[in-house]
Image (cartoon, rainbow, N blue to C red):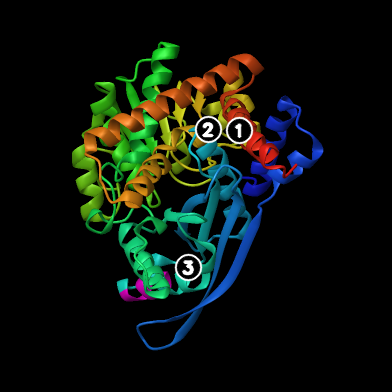
Amino acid sequence: MESYNSFQVAQHQVREAARLLHLDKATVELLSWPQREFRCTLQVRMDDGRIENFHAYRIQYNYARGPAKGGIRFHPDETVDTIRALASWMTWKTAVIDLPLGGAKGGVCCNPKTMSPRELENLSRAYIRAIHPMIGIDRDVPAPDVYTNPQTMAWMMDEYETITGRHHPGVLTDKPQQIGGTEGRRDATARGGVITVREACSALGADPTKAFAIQGFGNAGQRAALLHREILGGGKLVGVSDSRGAIYLPEGMDPEELVMHKLKSGSVLGFPGAKVIPQEALLELDVEVLYPAALENVITEDNAPNIRARVICELANGPTTPAADIILNRKGIHVIPDILASAGGVTVSYFEMIQDSYSWFWEEELVHGRLDSKLTRAYHAVQEAIREKHVHPRLGAMVVGVARVAEAAKLRGWV
């Protein structure tokens, strides 16, 4: 399969939206590049006593609408361009949901699967020591991403508070509830995605109680499996994949049993009754709803002609290339783009920032209700842009996000 530079994909999306909005050259250039980038090398003591070096990044793409917001990845394949792309998409994501935030992303090149908890803690604290002058509740608020979690955020928050000598729980979000986390954050990304699927199926006349498949069975994928039935009133999970392989069971799999199997065995492989299929075949199953919930650029012009789902809900960041978007749109496949579909996480992270600011925490029902309201309004704002501009869904979402950021930049006098 041809390789894709994620940042070039992100820039292409920005410029396409800017063309439809008739933005001037200076504004287009501002929105096509990060406003601030930081690279460093972290020295971390390993369990055997040796010191190992890790390359790390924090990129604040745009903060015209408010403090930058975005996750931190621990992944062996991170590059400056993947982080730039993810920071770009976070900028449009917060704008599409109409949050008073900008976009950022961070990453450390490492293989967390080979590291002990102590080594991961040392790495987390080293990262914060390097970037602490750049972050803060009024500057940049990180959160977890691939291979990071609430425990990672707890270590990072503690290191930040140790350095500053002050209590700053809102400097990182998706923390454990005991130290400033919020109700409703664990399943927020998946819940937001399933809410948009509900709205899409209602608008299209699709049936969400038919077969669905999930590519990537990490936190978001597992939660989507559980919430699809809860929110949509049914559905048959026929296909699932993770980094080790893909499985298929046309009669359907019980989501709770599959999650337990994954947690116990470390993979979806070996689930009773399911047969192993090629990874690429998972995306091409005949289903009503497909959830890509893994990494970037998995749906391309090579496999888009073979996609048979009626609705694609992108819980991953950037899973579809620009050429594939056009093919899917021509086939009548409704894509709920990542900057809308996976925005539930950052929305509830924003709720966490608010609650941390005045030390008053909401009940889970209130968090869910406000998340539903935000995602529902955002979905229909994107649909309005699609109808007005006669474009495919991703471009419609980009039009909404880019227009809002461009307006904020102009009001500030930046362009």
User: Looking at the picture, does residue 262 appear above or below residue 159?
Assistant: above
Residue extent of the magenta highlight: 118-124
Residue under the image location 25 percent in, 45 percent down = 361
Residue 294 picture location, percent across and down: 44, 45
Label 1: element kind: helix
User: Looking at the picture, does residue 380 appear above or below residue 144?
Assistant: above
Give the quadrant of the C terminus.
top right
Mark 1, mark 2: which one is toward the viewer? 1
Q: What is the magenta segment's predominant secondary structure?
A: helix
Outermost residue on the top side: it is 205
Outermost residue on the bottom side: it is 49
What residue does disc 3 label?
110
Callout 2: 10 Å neighbours few (<14), some, many (20+)?
Answer: many
Mark 3, mark 2: which one is toward the viewer? 2
Residue under the image location 21 percent in, 39 percent down = 363
Q: In this orientation, which residue lies closer to the viewer: 181 or 217?
A: 181
Q: Does residue 109 appear anywhere in the picture?
A: yes
Residue under the image location 63 percent in, 28 percent down = 399
Label 2: element kind: helix
Magenta-drawn stretch contains 122: yes
Magenta-drawn stretch contains 21: no
Marks 1 & 2, CB-CB < 8 Å contact:
yes
Q: Does residue 287 appear anywhere in the picture?
A: no
Residue 405 picture location, percent across and down: 62, 37
What residue does disc 2 label?
96
| Figure disc tally | 3
- Disc 1 residue type? Arg
Q: Is residue 84 left or right of residue 181?
A: right
- Disc 3 residue type? Cys
Q: Is residue 382 left or right of residue 237?
A: right
Q: In this orientation, which residue lies closer to the viewer: 46 or 3?
A: 46
Q: Quadrant location of residue 203?
A: top left
